[in-house]
Amino acid sequence: MEQRKVKKAIGVESFIFLLFFVGFFYFLCSTMGTVNMFNTLMKTAHSLLLDTVFFIMAIAVVAGAIGALLSEFGVVALINKILSPLMKPIYDLPGAATLGIITTYMSDNPAIITLAKDKGFSRYFKKYQIPSLTNIGTAYGMGLIVTTFMMAQKAPAGENFIKAALIGNIGAVIGSIVSVRLMQIKTKKVYGTEEMAIITEDKGIDIMNYREVRSGGTAGRILEAMLEGGKAGVELGFSIIPGVLIICTLVLLLTNGPSTTGQYTGAAFEGVAFLPWLGSKITFVIEPLFGFQNPQALAFPITSLGSVGAAISLVPDFIKRGIVGGNEIAVFTAMGMCWSGYLSTHVAMMDALGCRKLTGHAILSHTIGGLAAGISAHFLYLLL
């Protein structure tokens, strides 16, 4: 049984947290006014729930249905077979890892943990390769949702962002390679390069050559796959509500300024413009690396650290206000996919793989990978 972690009921961290908590809300209230701050907080969360969360959920339902169909009728297996020979030279992973990429791309980061627990999957891996599944799974997590969301956006002038979103996907691939390779430098030192992850007589199903299908006729399988895939989309939509409402609301409070009149009215989406101020101080770094023309765009990668669902909900407002264009969408797609809320999932994923002691290195490797994804997407956009 797992040992429970306990601390003294009252300690130093209680007072430190209380100091920061009170200081943070004192800063907001003293700038916006107490009543205005609470009104803005509630109205912003309400607007995000109605206008953003349900839109993302709709995309997740449709994408989930399509993904389930592709898996049911072997298209995913076909893609897996085609891409498998590339995995060793690019990622130093067996071909089975392609299945993890596709699974997480169509769902979310932790989906690869379910595969890793399957002996039929993990028997292809050496021990040093298992921890890097966290990095490669996270790099592609929610990829389909992020990509389709970005493609669905349009600039006020009618410009679409399909090409920018595809470039962002390439950037995410580059970031994933950086993240996995950096992670494996450490895991090779810890585990060596020869020991297999699983040594067992139970070979399970050969997932590279066989796949499970639903029972029944073709029409029944189509219907069942779409409904189950759509149901998974609904569950994903509900699961992102806390992240969007909590993280995104706070980020918007720190990103936006007062109303157009320059006064605080308590309306939704007002804020204290702290992140733009911070971004203006490091413009000399973020502009050449990411090509951001407006420091407010920095809010997207920062939010992605905790929840990419919350981060993409920032995009429609940014586009409407002319803060972002094609370059930013490419960078957002790359960093949103590659980071995809990894600070909130990495610890649990590494723990599930039995590699808790390597969590810090996994987070460091993935931080560098996400930065590489954004930088490469920017330069690819300039080239293409």
Image (tube, rainbow, N blue to C red):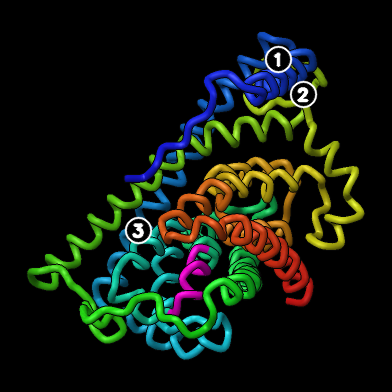
Q: Please name which of the two marks, 3 or 1, marks the residue nearer to the observer.
A: 3
Q: Which residue is mark 3?
A: 64
Q: Quadrant of the C terminus?
A: bottom right
Q: 122 left or right of 27?
A: left
Q: Nearer the viewer, residue 194 or 178?
A: 194
Q: Kindly report the distance in space between the C-alpha atoms of the residues bearing marks 2 and 3.
A: 39 Å
Q: Tell me the magenta residue range.
A: 126-134
x, y (%) of residue 234?
33, 46
Q: Which residue is mark 1?
A: 265
The numbered mark, 2 or 3, whose residue comes first in the sequence reads 3
Residue plotted at (74% across, 11% down): 33
Q: Main secondary structure of the magenta part?
A: helix
Amino acid type indicated by mark 3: Gly
46 vs 152, nearest the viewer = 46
Work out how far the residue at label 1 is from the one at label 2, CA to CA, in angstroms.
8 Å
Callout 3: SS: helix
- Which residue does the numbered mark 2 point to in the structure image? 258
